[in-house]
Amino acid sequence: MSENVGKDSQAYYDKMTKTPLAKLIITLGIPTTISMLVTSIYNMADTYFVGTLGESAQGATGILFTLQAIIQAVAFMLGQGSGTMVSKALADKDQKEASEYVSTAFFTGVGMGVVLMVGGLLFLTPFMRLLGSTETILPYARQYGICVLASCPFTIGSFVLNNNLRYEGKAFYAMIGLVTGGVLNIFGDYMLIRIFSLGVLGAGISTAVSQFISFLILLYFFRKMAQSSIRVSLFSRRAEVLLTISRVGFPALIRQGLSSASSGLLNNLTRPYGDAAIAAMSVVNRFSAFVMCVGLGIGQGYQPVASFNYQAKEYKRVKRGLLITMGVGMAFISCLAVPGLLFSQQIVYLFQKSGEVMAIGVFALRCACVGVMFLPLSVPVNMLFQSIRKPAVSSFLSLLRSGLMFIPTLLITTRLWGLLGIQISQPLADVLTGLASVPFTVVFLRKKDFT
């Protein structure tokens, strides 16, 4: 048994340190990208099917998009924090330590999911209003919100499992779990909304069921494929283990948490312009998230490569990997952003045919497609510093897009130009974030002393 474990460890070590970088990053990044794209597609499917029910119902998907971002913030912090430490432990060929980190993250995540579920359900109405719901959107947001909150423990558990499978080089199996849930969600939306006429509640039930099935599939693959193990007995009672996971994963919490906070602020600032404006920005944000998945997916494919090779002192591979990730991300994002720019009117019309929504959404989508072209300048370097356990730098970079750049930009442009400011704020923040990240990339690439 120990001999087989040793062979597995050595084979994994050779794979991460000797496989050609472009092949390794793309091999790990493509399944992750597909997973995120399918997840984004089923989010857009919710937007599409719910959009047939009217502007207010579609506005509810924008409100719940913010709630889902909050849940994902917790999940990514635990998943990427533990995944980074698992990768480090496996580079040192210490499977017991790897198992301790992933077990602690998994059970902590499920527990936090239960707390968030109970708290959210107890204060559902004020929570939905806090996220930007109007009185006409509120009944739909409540129906959808109950289902999203009920599935919260399984959602967080799924993301922890998914991230740790990725960091162990099992991105293909992580993809199967998320893709299966995504396809089931799309099918469920069609059946429950179109066939059984359950409306927004049907979309929520479909989302909750698909998250539960994804959780079961990912748990099965983790037990079968991962080098580390998840067991209650391996849950660490040492505060330093959870603190380390939280510290290393904190940039991911900032990325997702600020995304939810800024999304809530956007909803509240858009509210005076009516349900049509909220619905239009919901469509734009869903499509932007879809395009952004490519940059995040390739970046997440690079994360285990950076983490493992940094620990193995293969610093040249870390540097070359960063440049490859930026180039591949730019090529892939362009393949989606350019058509989005050219066919903005058709895309918005697909989701919502209201003339008022079209008038607001088309221009906003064109601006968004320009902004996302700058993501390859910021996302890979942010993920690099998180993966090499430099949380202070990574946290600062995470603060930029949805915090230091977006929130002031949103407040200033909205005050100056009203609805136009809302439409251009996120793309402008994306451009500024990309440019601000360039010096960090240059300094790292020139760095010679990594001690």
Image: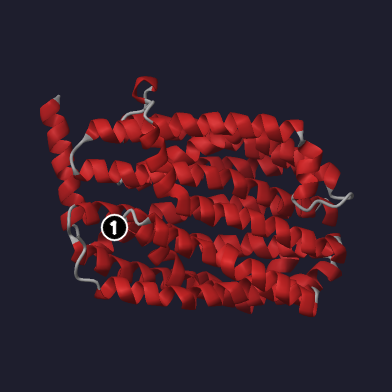
* Residue in the foreground of this view, choosing between 184 and 37: 37
Q: Is residue 316 left or right of residue 150?
A: left
Where is residue 448, by image quadrant? bottom left
Q: Position of residue 415 (x, y in %)?
A: 78, 75
Residue 298 in view of the camera: no
Q: Image point 26% across, 68% down: which residue?
A: 319
Q: What amino acid does circle 1 point to?
A: Ala
Front residue of 420 and 5: 420
Query: Which element type, helix, strand or loop, lies under badge 1?
Result: helix
Q: Position of residue 252 (x, y in %)?
A: 48, 52
Mark 1 nearby-residue class (10 Å; few <14, some 14–19, many ≥20): many
**In the picture, which quadrant includes the N terminus?**
top left
- The answer to whether any part of residue 297 appears in the image is yes
Q: Residue at x 83, y 57 (%)?
A: 55
What sort of colour scheme is used for the picture? secondary structure
Total marks shown come to: 1
Q: In the picture shown, does residue 260 fall above or below 148?
A: below
Q: Residue furthest front?
A: 239
Q: Residue furthest right?
A: 136
Q: Give the side of residue 342 with respect to residue 281, left or right.
A: left
Residue 262: image quadrant is: bottom right
Give the image location of residue 128, x and y in percent: 77, 45
Residue at 20% across, 36% down: 94
Q: Quadrant of the C terminus?
A: bottom left
Q: Which residue is mark 1?
A: 306
Q: Which is nearer the eye, 203 or 136? A: 136
Question: Measured along the vertical axis of the image, is residue 451 above or below residue 346?
Answer: above
